[in-house]
Amino acid sequence: MTRVANGTPVRQLDLGTLLPYLDLHLVGATNGVRLFSAARVSWAGTPHEEDFARLRREIGQERAFLKRLIKALGHRPSLLKMALARVLSVVAELDPLNPMRRRANAGAQLELEALQSLLKGKEALWSTLLALSADASATTGDAVLNRPVLEQLLDASKRQQETVARVMTETAADRFLRH
């Protein structure tokens, strides 16, 4: 902790803890882009296909933002973690929860629940960074932890969760009720 000229304590970001955390979220975001691509394929030809295409674009843009944030903090993502992200994204593209891309089976439900889980984790990321933005010093925090941008990202993650939840509830009967 340092002090500004008037003696008020100022807290600085602990990059030794923050950067590995951001790296892991970047791995998750890389995987998330592929998972939403797989979901778009699963829901192709339905009214929900565009929802998943839009979510995939948004997740991709947020991933790019996270990567820029990490670089703005003077860090390059770990090569090992990014290799892991690539491997996981290939697995995600195979869609192990719903490999046949069926919409009316338990795999489809698990796929939707996994997407919800990823989005909830992303919400926690933006919420955490937003909490840090109020306490971080101007020398590092204000330059990279832009409150209005983080608030927009937090709101977007909540809307994205609502979209997936809507698809899940609108299509649950197709999976779990006999016709």
Image (tube, rainbow, N blue to C red):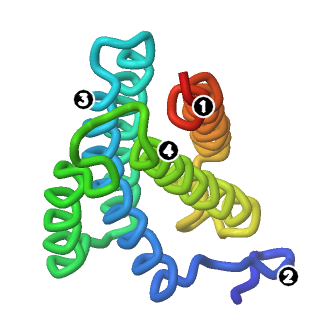
Q: Secondary structure at mark 3?
A: helix
Q: Which residue is mark 4?
A: 109
Q: Which mark is residue 7?
A: 2
Q: Which mark is in front, 4 or 3? A: 4
Q: Secondary structure at mark 2?
A: loop
At x 42%, y 32%, the residue is 104
Q: Secondary structure at mark 1?
A: loop
Question: In the rendered structure, which disc, 1 or 2, sits on the residue that comes first in sequence?
Answer: 2
At x 60%, y 27%, the residue is 173
Q: Which residue is mark 1?
A: 177
**Is residue 25 found left or right of 158 in the rendered image?**
left
Q: Amino acid at mark 3?
A: Val
Question: In the rendered structure, which disc, 2 or 4, sits on the residue that comes first in sequence?
Answer: 2
Q: Which residue is mark 3?
A: 41
Image coords of residue 76 (percent x, y): 24, 71
Distance between the alpha carbons at the discs numbered 4 and 3? 15 Å
Quarter of the image where one finds residue 177: top right
Label 4 Cα neighbours within 10 Å, binned few <14 / some 14-19 / many ≥20: many
Do the CB atoms of the residues marked 2 and 4 lie less than 8 Å apart?
A: no
Label 3 Cα neighbours within 10 Å, binned few <14 / some 14-19 / many ≥20: some
